[in-house]
Amino acid sequence: MSMAYEVPASENGFMRILFLGKTFPSSREHLRAVLPDDEITDATPREAKAIGLRAEVVIPTMCRVDSGLMDAVKPRLIQQFGVGLEGVDLDAARAREIAVANVPAAETGNASSVAELALLHLLVLFRRYGEARQAVGAGRLGEPIGEALSGKSAVLVGLGAVGQEVAARLHALGFKVIAVGRTSLAPGAPLPRNVDAHYSAAELTTALAQADCTVVCAALTPATRGLIGAPQIDSMPKGSFLVNVARGPVVEYEALLAALRSGHLGGAGLDVFWDEPIDPSDPLLRENVSVTPHVGGVTVSSYRAIAHAIAENVEHLRRGEPVRNRHA
């Protein structure tokens, strides 16, 4: 049964746009630049529920949008500022006939921005940047000795928009690029561009056994949650690196921590975590881990393009037209 409800349009045609959560502050600035006549505010989910804050458009920032929040805010559109929709209860949105949309990474430069950050983490790990920085402070020269990237093997878990951008950059640096997709390639099908070998998800451990480094690019879904666990990490060569620029729960936390503590993994590069922001006292941060605060897609060019795509959907909503990239 439909649970749809009607929300009156704002006076004078302007839209009330609510950012849920108070992270990723630059996203507001970029959206205000392209929607100067609309009301753009933010609140935590708890605040929004407590006061019954109403808005035509909800933009979640690393928080859950459940049925209770939908009933409190009564949005007409839940619009992701980027790609991931794992925090939105899509079934609840469908029941209420609320449109849910995202902005595909390939359309905005978001994918290339995330790929560049993956490369940053790989460089930090292979060239032992943390130790090099300490050596500068101690007045030492010519240490530590790092590893060249050229000639190494990299496994990409996920070959969507981000994975393809990572593959292009690693190929240019002389890596052997091994991709893991959901399914096998059709018999006789050519390899994807910039990829030297391709495996299906069922062959994941076979692929990982060849990796000097693994870059996780897969979206978080029920099928990928915990995809990289203890058996998969154990299959990686001793001393190899793992970089995650997808979502934290694609990798099992305890398995990663144990592998870093034992030295089985030489290090990890993380832009995403299991609870965000990560607790500064988390024991994982005491290991050889390169960390960034979920800034893979946080670049001026990416944010500018995402803001324009969202503004287009707001205009569609204002005119009563279908929104683009709708998922519910």
Image: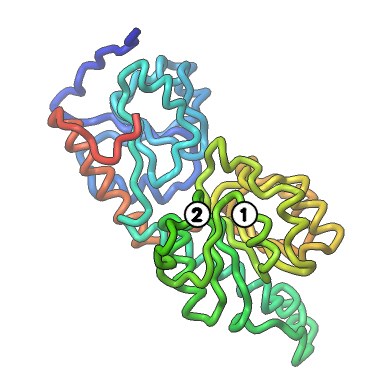
- Farthest residue to the bottom: give it: 142
Q: Name the amino acid, label 1.
A: Glu
Pick out the residue farthest to the front.
187
> On the rendered structure, is 191 left or right of 249?
left
Whether the residues at callouts 1 and 2 have beta carbons within 8 Å, the answer is yes
Q: What label sits on residue 184 in the rendered view? A: 2
Direction top: furthest residue: 1
- Where does label 1 land, which residue? 203
Would you identify the image quadrant in which residue 85 lies? Answer: top left
Quadrant (top left/top right/bottom left/bottom right) for the N terminus: top left
Residue 298 visible? The answer is no
Q: Farthest residue in the right direction?
A: 262
Whether residue 130 sits left or right of residue 122 in the image: it is right
Residue drawn at (78%, 56%) of the image: 234
- Looking at the rendered structure, the secondary structure element under dot 1 is helix
Residue at 20% x, 23% y: name it. Answer: 10
Q: Is residue 204 visible?
A: yes
Nearest to the observer: residue 4 or residue 216: 216
What residue type is disc 2 on?
Answer: Ser
- How many discs appear? 2
* Dot 1 or dot 2, earlier in sequence: 2
Q: Quadrant of residue 260?
A: bottom right
Left or right position of 325 against 46 = left
Q: Position of residue 75 (x, y in %)?
A: 33, 23
Packing grade of label 2 (10 A; few <14, some 14-19, many >=20) is some
**In the rendered view of the protein, which quadrant contains the C terminus?**
top left
Measuring from the top left, give residue 33's x and y in whole percent. Answer: 26, 50
Cα distance in 3D space between marks 1 and 2: 9 Å
Q: Residue at x 55, y 54 (%)?
A: 200
Kind of element beneath mark 2: loop
* Front-lying residue, 189 or 301: 189
The x and y percentages for residue 212 are: 68, 71
